[in-house]
Amino acid sequence: MEYAIYKKSLSREDPAYWVQRKKQKICDLTGSTSIAQYQLFNGMMTKKECTPEFMLWIIKHVDPLVCLETFLTIVPEDEIPEEVKIAAARKSQWGEVLYKLHNPSDAVINAALQTAGEWIVYVKNPTEQQWIVALKNSREYPNLITKHPKPTLQMQKIHVARYLDGIDYIENPCEAVKIAAAEGNGILVLTQRNMQNASEKVILTAIEHTLLPEMRDFLHYIPHPNHKIYCAMRHQVKIDQKIRAQIESEKEPQPPEPTELDYGTLIKRCAEIDPLRTAQTAKPDAPIQEKKAALTKLYDELRTNALNDLLGYRNAAHAM
């Protein structure tokens, strides 16, 4: 397929530019970014030209995964600098570089896992530390813990604190894991399958880590509390009330709203409803106070009429 190489032309704001682009198959090479992309993605760039500086620069402007795939066709993986791979891992935001590289270093793996921990499934023989990084940064993968054959107690605690339903993906969770789930999710976690018949300590922990609660919320999730649990509920509600009161007291005082509308606002609001009557009421030769009083009366009348029209419309709609 033949293209007309386009290096210098009309402004993009000129309609003639778009007419020309529509009539011809244009390869727009205006600007250094466009030229570099054309060379890189059309097999025209040499290994010498594909410098580390260029790689870092192009990653900022183009999809990093596409860039990395193209770099690998020009430069061997072991010759691509670490900072380039790390930049691609961080920019991609989804960790996809892990299945494009055959031998990523620990630094590259960690950069990718810190962005999207769920991509640890593409790491060959991940270490315990890498799993911890992955579990801390996974997104929308409450079942990620099941990908590890024997997750440690620390891993389980990290995972259940991040996901409300993460506890249900752990077989026979111990008391310490249940407490970690309660600390991370509050009383909502008590609805999960593996949290049924929770111990008093787990319930008390969930109450303590519930933000902005009301008593009815507690009783919804804990309908039959014993005396100790009920006292903990009341204590948490009181703490919350104190926090809310403190927040309210620290707010900057707002200026009081005007008790009456100024002349300019009256004119604007009346004109929005009935511009003709507004012009007739605001007589040019009348004193400002007289015009303001007349507009206030008109505004009240217009608002009343509008409200009556709305009520009449609703009544008519119900009668149909």
Image (cartoon, rainbow, N blue to C red):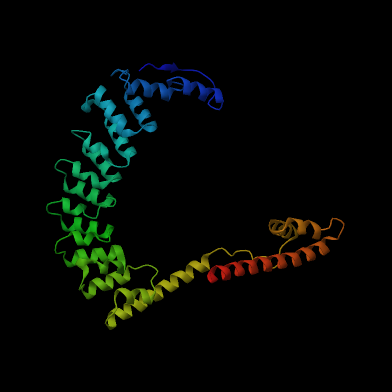
Residue farthest left in this picture: 149
Q: Which quadrant holds residue 90?
A: top left
Front in this rendered view, residue 320 or 203: 320
Residue farthest bottom in this picture: 227
Query: In the image, residue 222 lies at what x, y percent?
Result: 29, 76
Q: On screen, 181 above or below 116?
A: below
Query: In the image, residue 173 lies at what x, y percent?
Result: 16, 64
Identity of the residue drawn at 33% across and 74% down: 218
Front in this rendered view, residue 102 or 133: 102
Q: Which quadrant holds residue 315?
A: bottom right
Left or right: residue 247 versus residue 196 is right
Front in this rendered view, residue 238 or 98: 98
Identity of the residue drawn at 20% across and 46% down: 130
Left or right: residue 266 versus residue 320 is right
Q: Quadrant of the N terminus?
A: top left
Front in this rendered view, residue 195 or 22: 22
Query: In the image, residue 295 lies at what x, y percent?
Result: 76, 63
Tally of marks: 0
Query: In the image, residue 245 lies at what x, y percent?
Result: 48, 71
Identity of the residue drawn at 23% across and 40% down: 109
Identity of the residue drawn at 23% across and 38% down: 98
Left or right: residue 53 versus residue 133 is right
Q: Which quadrant holds residue 277?
A: bottom right
